[in-house]
Amino acid sequence: MSLAGWGLPVLALCALIVVALGTGRYGVPAGDVFAVLGAKLFGWPSTVEATVRTVVLQVRLPRVVAALVVGAALAGAGATYQGLFRNPLVSPDILGVSAGASLGAVLGIFLSLPVAAIQGLAFAGGLAAVAAVYAVGAAVRRHDPVLTLVLAGVAIGAVLGAAISLIKVLADPYNQLPAITYWLLGSLASVTLGDVGAILPAMGLGLVPLVLLRWRMNLMSLGEEEARALGVETRVLRPLLVAAATLVTAAAVSVTGVIGWVGLLVPHVARLLVGPDFRRLLPASLLLGAGYLLAVDCVARTLAPVEVPLGILTALMGAPFFLWLLASGRRGWA
């Protein structure tokens, strides 16, 4: 896709941002949204009421930014995992990163730690889970390293899931258990701009290798032996790319909770639109992931009197659409 071809999707995403800033229980016209943003960014004169400015800048802007960042991160990580493992059913939690982050956050809630500590434990738990998966994979030393990592990820994820269930049984059913359940369903309701700023360095550190090595991802998707025959050192490159995608996923999950289906569904849609070439697939996944999660968040805020957790909506919306893609898709995943 040419540079001009990316213009329309970018404009569509900008329009969606304006809609998201104006959507909610307190509706804000698009003109007022532009006026508030213009006054904030460029110092333009504005006669918009203080209440409207508060709603746009302090209530909705943080979660809009968080939806864009987290959606792009999960979709980019999903595209990377699917290419590395050459499997269309792989998602960012295949190596246990989501389960590890969930266990860290659940433990923090169980211990009544502050929000920053809970996020830190979630981030550390996601990285530790993938490290454990790689340690098990190195110890097993099967012929197929990809299959070994997937099976180790399934086993480690099951153990972490059991630990989460144990903590839920032991938690206070009136205070801790509802907080744990709500966190595991994923939400942007309590995310602040400070939270987004805290995870941006980790996300940047993870996305840079994916962008710089995107052409080598095309070779990695050919398979272990083919990639080595073409001069790619898979033993070095695969752990590097897995670590980068894991870092991005762990950072996202640490502030929003577990939001499924984004990393599984969005790369498929991007692949149908731009093809399997990772040089185009990665930016398309980032763009679509940002827009998809932002649209889902708008629905979550307006669907019912009480905000619906994002994990529920991504499953309800993602699963049927994914089945439709499987039934009607004309292009392969790689």
Image (spheres, grey):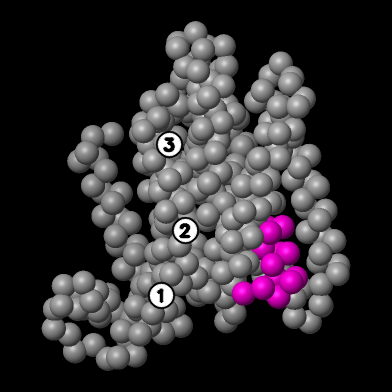
Image height of 108 relative to 132, above or below: below
Mark 3 or 2, closer to the camera: 2
The answer to which of 118 and 143 lies nearer the viewer is 118
Tag of residue 60: 1
- The x, y position of residue 206, in whole percent, is 46, 44
Residue shown at the point (57%, 81%) measured from the top left: 305
The residue shown at (79%, 46%) is: 158
Which residue in the structure is indicated by mark 2? 199
Residue name at image x 34 percent, y 90 percent:
51
Any mark on residue 95, and which? none
- Amino acid type at circle 3 is Leu
Pointer 1 or 3: first along the chain: 1
Q: Which mark is residue 210?
A: 3
Is 86 contained in the magenta span?
Answer: no
- Camera-near label (2 vs 1) is 2
311 sits left or right of 215 in the view:
right
- Of 130 and 84, which appears nearest the observer? 130
The image shows residue 286 at horizontal and vertical percentages of: 41, 46
Magenta stretch in the rendered image: 102-114
Q: Nearer the viewer, residue 77 or 269?
A: 77
Whether the residues at callouts 1 and 3 have beta carbons within 8 Å, the answer is no
Closer mark to the observer between disc 1 and disc 3: 3
Please tell me whether residue 111 belongs to the stretch shown in magenta. yes
Q: CA distance from mark 3 to mark 2?
A: 17 Å
Marks 2 & 1, CB-CB < 8 Å contact: no
Q: Would residue 85 be found to the left or right of residue 9 on screen?
A: right
Mark 1 residue type: Arg
- N-term mark: 3 or 2: 2
Determine the CA span between mark 2 and mark 1. Answer: 19 Å
Is residue 78 in sight in this rendering? Answer: no
Q: Residue at x 50, y 70 (%)?
A: 191
